[in-house]
Amino acid sequence: MKTIKASDLHARRMANDPAYRDAYEALGEEFDLVSALLAARANAGLTQAEIAARMGTTESAISRLESGRVKPSTRTLEKYARATGCRLTIRLDPLGAAAE
């Protein structure tokens, strides 16, 4: 069975699927979180089922989390980070002219 990286699938769909591209751009910051979650799981080499088992939840909950359909709590993000061997970092960045 051939394994496809999430990043490869994303790049392919961005290039070839206008509806996917529009949905990605509409999500903005939410998609940044989804991308970070997918990258963490891919780097850890884990399936959604394996992440779910490590977090004590269901595979469908991980699917919803990674889809961006739910806004996760900090606690959930901490569990996901631990399950993937990552450290959760939250930061606030200034916007626009306030950054200067």
Image (tube, helix red, strand yellow):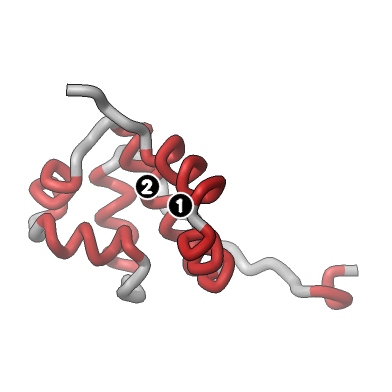
Q: Residue at x 48, y 41 (%)?
A: 12
Disc 2/disc 1 C-alpha distance (Å): 5 Å
Quarter of the view holding residue 50: top left
* Residues at discs 2 and 1 in contact (Cβ within 8 Å): yes
Query: Is 59 situated left or right of 33 in this image?
Result: left
Type of the residue with mark 1 = Ser
Q: Which mark is residue 69?
A: none
Looking at the rendered image, the quarter that the N terminus falls into is top left
Q: Residue at x 91, y 68 (%)?
A: 100
Q: Give the answer, above or below, for where 41 lies relative to 4.
A: below
The residue singled out by tag 2 in the image is 38
| Residue 73 visible here | no
Q: Residue at x 15, y 53 (%)?
A: 55
| Residue 28 visible here | yes
What is the x, y in percent for residue 81? 33, 49
Type of the residue with mark 2 = Leu
Quarter of the view holding residue 73: bottom left
Q: Which mark is residue 35?
A: 1
Q: Give the answer, above or below, for where 63 lies relative to 68.
A: above
Label 1: few (<14), some (14–19) or many (≥20) C-alpha neighbours in 10 Å: some
What is the x, y in percent for residue 76? 27, 64
Quarter of the view holding residue 40: top left
Q: Nearer the viewer, residue 38 or 78?
A: 38
Q: Nearer the viewer, residue 6 or 94?
A: 6
Query: Is 93 situated left or right of 8 in this image?
Result: right
Q: Residue furthest top?
A: 1
Q: Secondary structure at mark 2?
A: helix
Query: Is 100 situated left or right of 41 in this image?
Result: right
Q: Secondary structure at mark 1?
A: helix
Query: Is 27 situated left or right of 46 in this image?
Result: right
Label 2: few (<14), some (14–19) or many (≥20) C-alpha neighbours in 10 Å: some
What is the x, y in percent for residue 33? 46, 60
